[in-house]
Amino acid sequence: MSAKDIDFNNLGFSYIKTDLRYISYWKDGKWDDGQLTEDNVLHISEGSPSLHYGQQSFEGLKAYRCKDGSINLFRPDKNAERMQASCDRLLMPEVPTDVFVEACKQVVKANEAYLPPYGTGGSLYLRPFIIGTGDNIGVNAAREYIFSIFCMPVGPYFKGGMTPHNFVVSSYDRAAPNGTGAAKVGGNYAASLLAGKEARERKFSDAIYLDPATHTLIEEVGAANFFGITEDDEFVTPLSPSILPSITKYSLLYLAEHRLGLKATEGLVPIDGLEQFKEAGACGTAAVITPIGGIQNGDDFHVFYSETEVGPITTKLYDELVGIQYGDVMAPDGWIFKV
Ligand SMILES: Cc1ncc(COP(=O)(O)O)c(C=O)c1O
């Protein structure tokens, strides 16, 4: 679709082919210089370990058009670092932070026509990924890799955006305690597809995953982290080795404490203790802040603030975070990279 045919005011979260993407090849122990290409189709060996054994990792981050026309990237260095950790876990070569950030900037510049205008609420979603490629058949790490970044304009991940959504506790596990839950790797998402489908069939927005060892603690809300605001105005978000270390979550922990003056902690969040929270939400790059109306757990349906209204602290956190991303609110040092 050409950029001029896009209705930037009514974007969802779907694939749109944009003009150019970055691609770099790793061979003989090193990355090549990388380049932009129009081709959105990869040609790889049928033996590629990414296809059979899930040796791959991906990231998600956004670029925002500001009021003054400039373009912000939100904490891309943190995505680079997280991808390096995912690569370490799956025996893939790291992409250096400066290469990653520079490639993000190149992709945004090359597809600037697709960047939703300021005020539409849209953004340009960047999807970096690394896959293990090359002829192989045993369960081995690949000897060749592709690192690529493509992008597309997006609106809210959960339909309706900043309105309360209901979620259901899944009986499926997403990732094992010493597994790959903290890495952003495809296997975790493959494992979540059935749970997500079943949740949506029951008219919930997505599944909530509990800790796989005891099934008593909240871990993830679909592809987002959980947070709750206690009756004592404390921002609490789950602490666990098997959840994805969300960049949005760490940003909110900082903003809750330093901008809203709340106590902010990572701790255990028992599924049987939801009444301690007066507000709750899901947070992530795609989800931004999605207020949680209620959670279905077995026969019990617990409503937090309201199923239709957004709580005041969730609203303040949203305004602060989104204001920083679009350049309307002063960002903490190092959070914004200008393109
Ligand atoms: C499973 C999962 N949890 C949490 C998040 C939120 O992470 P971030 O805020 O870095 O986007 C994501 C999205 O990347 C995710 O896929």
Image (cartoon, helix red, strand yellow):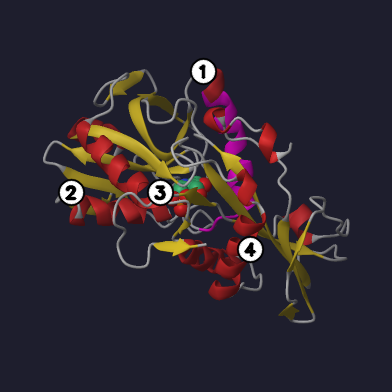
Q: Which residue is mark 3?
A: 326
- Foreground mark, 1 or 3, reads 3
Q: Amino acid at mark 4?
A: Gln
Residue 325 at x, y percent in the picture:
40, 51
Magenta run includes residue 284:
no
Q: Residue at x 41, y 55 (%)?
A: 247
Q: Amino acid at mark 2?
A: Leu
Q: Secondary structure at mark 1?
A: loop
Tell me which numbered mark, 2 or 3, is placed earlier along the sequence: 2
| 306 lies above or below 27 | above
Tell me which numbered mark, 2 or 1, is placed earlier along the sequence: 1
Pointer 2 local density, CA inside 10 Å: few below 14, some 14–19, many at least 20: some
Judging depth in this view, the residue of 121 and 112 nearest the camera is 112
Q: CA distance from mark 1 to mark 3?
A: 35 Å
Tell me which numbered mark, 1 or 3, is placed earlier along the sequence: 1
Residue closest to the far left: 232
- Foreground mark, 4 or 2, reads 4
Residue 33 at x, y percent in the picture:
73, 76
Is the stretch drawn in magenta largely helix, strand or loop?
helix
Q: Residue at x 78, y 53 (%)?
A: 51
- Disc 4 under 8 Å from ligand 1? The reply is no
Q: Which residue is mark 1?
A: 202
Q: Amino acid at mark 1?
A: Arg
Which stretch is magenta? Answer: 183-199
| Residue 243 in sight here | no
| 27 lies above or below 118 | below
Residue 106, numbered circle: 4
Tell me which numbered mark, 4 or 3, is placed earlier along the sequence: 4
Residue 4 at x, y percent in the picture:
67, 36
Residue closest to the far front: 68
